[in-house]
Amino acid sequence: MHFLIDAKRFVAAFYIAFYNLSTLTQWCATGEIDTSHIIERVFKDRKRCFVPRCTSNSEMLMLEARSVKDILSFSKNKWQIPEPPQSENRAEAMECKELDLIIVPGVAFDEQNRRCGHGAG
């Protein structure tokens, strides 16, 4: 993953969102890449990190995570993916209007570059 961490867009980015956190807190048998070292680098470089919280079957918010320790404290949803609590005062990525980069790990993408998931949407 050094190619991503060394990429100009990553280096220049300050507001970074991650679509999936499952690989940070558990071994992921889905075949998706482990993003934990990328997330750790975001915090090491003092960038702002946003992670998903599902609000319904078709909607999500991207809420700020403050540290790896913060992420590891998140409760897991029904898919065993950690989510930030919505009740705390956390910045929401769309309110910042400065989101520089979204990292979307996946096993496959369709012709329109949409992530092929695991049946949940």
Image: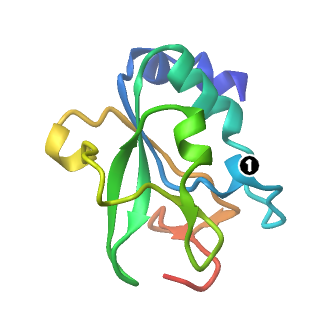
Q: Is 101 displayed left or right of 108 in the figure?
A: left
Tag 1 secondary structure = loop
Q: Is 70 displayed left or right of 12 in the figure?
A: right
Residue at 60% across / 85% down in the picture?
Answer: 119
Is residue 89 or residue 91 the one in the foreground?
89
Looking at the picture, how far across and down is residue 58, in whole percent?
Answer: 36, 81
Is residue 82 or residue 105 the one in the foreground?
82
Q: Is residue 110 visible?
A: no
Q: Is residue 113 above or below residue 11?
A: below
Looking at the picture, how far across and down is residue 108, in whole percent?
Answer: 66, 65
Residue at 35% across / 22% down in the picture?
Answer: 14
Q: Is 94 displayed left or right of 101 in the figure?
A: left
Q: How is the image coloured?
A: rainbow
Identify the image quadrant of the N terminus: top right
In which image quadrant can residue 66 be found?
top left
Residue at 58% across / 49% down in the picture?
Answer: 73
Looking at the picture, how far across and down is residue 80, in whole percent?
Answer: 65, 70
Q: Is residue 30 above or below residue 12?
A: below
Q: Is residue 67 visible?
A: yes
Looking at the picture, how far across and down is residue 25, in whole percent?
Answer: 71, 51
Is residue 121 or residue 76 the one in the foreground?
76
Residue count near mark 1 (Cα–Cα under 10 Å), binned few <14, some 14–19, many ≥20: some
Residue at 61% across / 64% down in the picture?
Answer: 81
In which image quadrant can residue 26 be found?
bottom right
State the residue position of label 1.
33
Under mark 1, the amino acid is Ile
Q: Is 93 displayed left or right of 111 in the figure?
A: left
In which image quadrant can residue 9 be found?
top left
Q: Is residue 119 above or below residue 53?
A: below
